[in-house]
Image (cartoon, grey):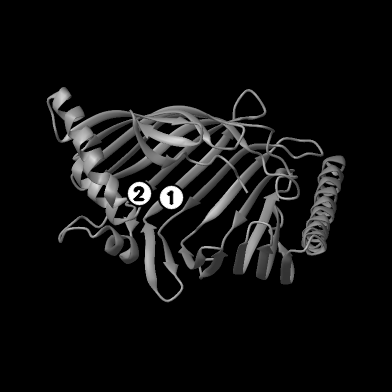
């Protein structure tokens, strides 16, 4: 019995010692990461790093975090955030974001994000590169507002996951938003009819993505991994009487544009066309020609309100049959 007690005490002491060492290392590495970003020209500031989580997790709470990347123009200010990992394996990490407002800025504008119980989980392979095995972002009710109080979007729940497949460069993407709600800004821009539903019935997607390299700890410090091939299993959106379903496959051309096809099935497409013109996604002078072509496609299927079409991405352009629709989507991650 005495040997058992001694063994248990030794294990407890070793566990406490490991937790203390891991906590000290986490704090040091966090502070060093901020120092490294500053040396690269970032604005990277944190007012305080405090430790906790004993005994199951090693956690560091960062207060008043300010980050700005001069290359991308992305900046973020958080009142606090918590980094943590399981005591037994530091490669299973979690980032808990604050329940209070976070400020986000890009070259296009400034926003305020409010999210309840928002967190990101990372599962990393053992090794010095800390290659990404899985990443998930979840949140309960969230709201994104433009500076000045104009709401842009919100929802009751968000799930976004990226999971590594058999090959190191291949990842499976899942996206789902419950009760997605475009805010006052988008609704005004789209000129929606009175009484149009506030929320989407469905907004979800699944895709397989092949990058040029595996995602690892150097992702933020060097060149971002660039998608080379996207296989869109499906993307579905249902809003009011409109339904959009899409599948497709496209690779990245030498200039970074998508090259391939996207098949779209649309119900009540005329409303979608009006929304695309109202929002500026489609030039108004192209609407009559596209409308005539789409009506002929609808007549050929016998249901004029529904469409089944294929968009072609080629030579940096998007075409519907012989009709040019503008530049192809960019596949460059900055």
Q: Is residue 170 left or right of residue 328?
A: right
The answer to whether the residue labelled 2 contacts the one labelled 1, judged by CB atoms less than 8 Å apart, is yes
Q: Is residue 119 left or right of residue 90?
A: left
Which mark is first along the chain, 1 or 2? 1
Tell me the crowding category of disc 2: few under 14, some 14 to 19, or many 20 or more residues within 10 angstroms, Cα based.
some
Q: Quadrant of the N terminus?
A: top right
- Say which residue appears at 44% left-offset and 69% top-offset: 146
x, y (%) of residue 211?
63, 33
Tell me the crowding category of disc 1: few under 14, some 14 to 19, or many 20 or more residues within 10 angstroms, Cα based.
many
Image quadrant in which you'd find residue 124: top right
Which residue is at the far bottom?
148
- Say which residue appears at 79% left-offset and 53% top-offset: 19
Secondary element type, mark 2: strand
Q: CA distance from mark 2 to mark 1?
A: 6 Å
x, y (%) of residue 198?
25, 57
Q: Nearer the viewer, residue 209 or 284?
A: 284
Residue pointed to by mark 2: 178
Secondary element type, mark 1: strand
Image quadrant in which you'd find residue 298: top left
User: Can residue 173 be seen by looking at this rendering?
Assistant: yes
Q: Nearer the viewer, residue 15 or 325?
A: 325
Tell me, for residue 158, which label it has, or none: 1
Q: Is residue 144 left or right of residue 136?
A: left
User: Can residue 56 be seen by looking at this rendering?
Assistant: no
- Say which residue appears at 23% left-offset and 60% top-offset: 191
x, y (%) of residue 73?
62, 61
Compared to 127, does 184 lie above or below?
Answer: below
Compared to 260, does 324 lie above or below?
Answer: below
């Amino acid at each position: 019995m005495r040997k058992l007690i001694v063994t248990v005490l030794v294990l407890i002491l070793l566990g406490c010692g490991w937790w203390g060492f891991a906590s000290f290392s986490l704090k040091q590495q966090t502070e060093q990461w901020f120092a490294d970003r500053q040396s690269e020209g970032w604005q990277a500031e944190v007012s305080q790093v405090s430790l906790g989580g004993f005994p199951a997790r090693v956690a560091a709470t960062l207060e008043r975090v300010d980050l700005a990347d001069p290359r991308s123009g992305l900046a973020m200010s958080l009142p606090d955030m918590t980094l943590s990992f399981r005591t037994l394996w530091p490669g299973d990490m979690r980032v808990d974001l604050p329940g209070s407002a976070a400020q986000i800025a890009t070259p296009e504008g400034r926003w305020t994000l409010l999210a309840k119980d928002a967190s990101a989980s990372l599962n990393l392979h053992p090794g010095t590169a800390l290659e990404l095995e899985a990443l998930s972002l979840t949140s309960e009710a969230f709201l994104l507002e433009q500076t000045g109080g104009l709401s842009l979007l919100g929802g009751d729940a968000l799930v976004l996951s990226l999971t590594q497949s058999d090959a190191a460069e291949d990842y499976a993407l899942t996206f789902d938003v419950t009760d997605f709600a475009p805010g006052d800004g988008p609704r005004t821009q789209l000129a929606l009819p009175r009484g149009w539903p506030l929320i989407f019935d469905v907004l979800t997607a699944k895709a397989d993505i092949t990058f040029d390299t595996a995602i690892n700890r150097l992702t933020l410090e060097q060149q971002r991994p660039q998608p080379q091939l996207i296989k869109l299993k499906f993307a579905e959106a249902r809003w009011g009487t409109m339904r959009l379903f899409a599948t497709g496959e496209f690779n990245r051309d030498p200039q970074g544009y998508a090259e391939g096809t996207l098949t779209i099935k649309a119900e009540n497409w005329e409303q979608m066309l009006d929304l695309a013109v109202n929002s500026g996604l489609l030039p108004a002078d192209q609407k009559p020609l596209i409308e005539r072509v789409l009506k002929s496609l609808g007549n050929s299927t016998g249901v004029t309100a529904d469409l089944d079409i294929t968009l072609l991405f080629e030579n940096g352009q998007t075409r519907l049959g012989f009709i040019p629709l503008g530049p192809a989507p960019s596949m460059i991650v900055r």
